[in-house]
Amino acid sequence: MFQDDPYQAYLSENIPSSNPVGLVTALYEGAIKAVQEARHCLETEEIWGRSKAISKAVDILTELILSLDHEKGGDLSKRLQELYGYMQHRLLTAHANQEDQPMAEVISLLTTMLDGWYKVGERLSQEASEAAAEQTEAAAEMPADTIPTPYGYDFAPAEVGTAAFTF
């Protein structure tokens, strides 16, 4: 299906399995790249290219708005929705008025937020590494004649053959 488009093939293989932080950072990176493209098109007077790039950035911001969980996010998700809406407005204003400054402002906002998401990703990765190290230590301390099972029950090898299961 996507054999002729390597970008779509990459997305179809990698995006569904990505973690939420990875997806958010990918959206931010895509929005920044689209706004940079729009700025380039403004400079080179490519109206169609600028229009496409602005539309892409606005679409990405819409996706970010739609991904907000207002029940869990509370006031923060409401403020993020307002900020994303503000950025969309600035991009559309920049496009309509053929101005670079609003696009530069949006890139600055997105870059600041992306840096924060990178830090979140680093922290989660570090916590996952620490948790894995703790599990490895716990497994090393386990008696060699114990067989762990995924359900939390440990059977000594002699008991495995005598366990009766009923359904």
Image (cartoon, grey):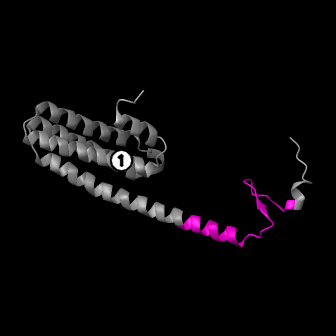
Whether 14 is drawn above or below 153: the answer is above
Whether 114 is drawn above or below 56: the answer is below
Residue 143 percent coordinates (x, y): 77, 70
Q: Nearer the viewer, residue 53 or 112?
A: 53
Q: Residue at x 40, y 35 (%)?
A: 9
Mark 1 surroundings: few (<14), some (14-19) or many (≥20) residues within 10 A: some
Give yes or no for residue 87 being in the magenta stretch.
Answer: no
Q: Please indicate whether residue 37 sits to the left or right of residue 11 in the image.
A: left
Q: Is residue 90 visible?
A: no
Q: Please indicate whether residue 162 sits to the left or right of residue 97 in the image.
A: right
Residue topped by disc 1: 26
Whether 153 is drawn above or below 70: the answer is below
Q: Residue at x 63, y 66 (%)?
A: 135
The quadrant of the picture occupied by the C terminus is top right
The quadrant of the picture occupied by the N terminus is top left
Q: Examine the image and state in which quarter residue 53 appears.
A: top left
Residue 22 percent coordinates (x, y): 41, 50
Residue 149 percent coordinates (x, y): 75, 56
Residue 66 percent coordinates (x, y): 39, 39
Q: Examine the image and state in which quarter residue 7 appears.
A: top left
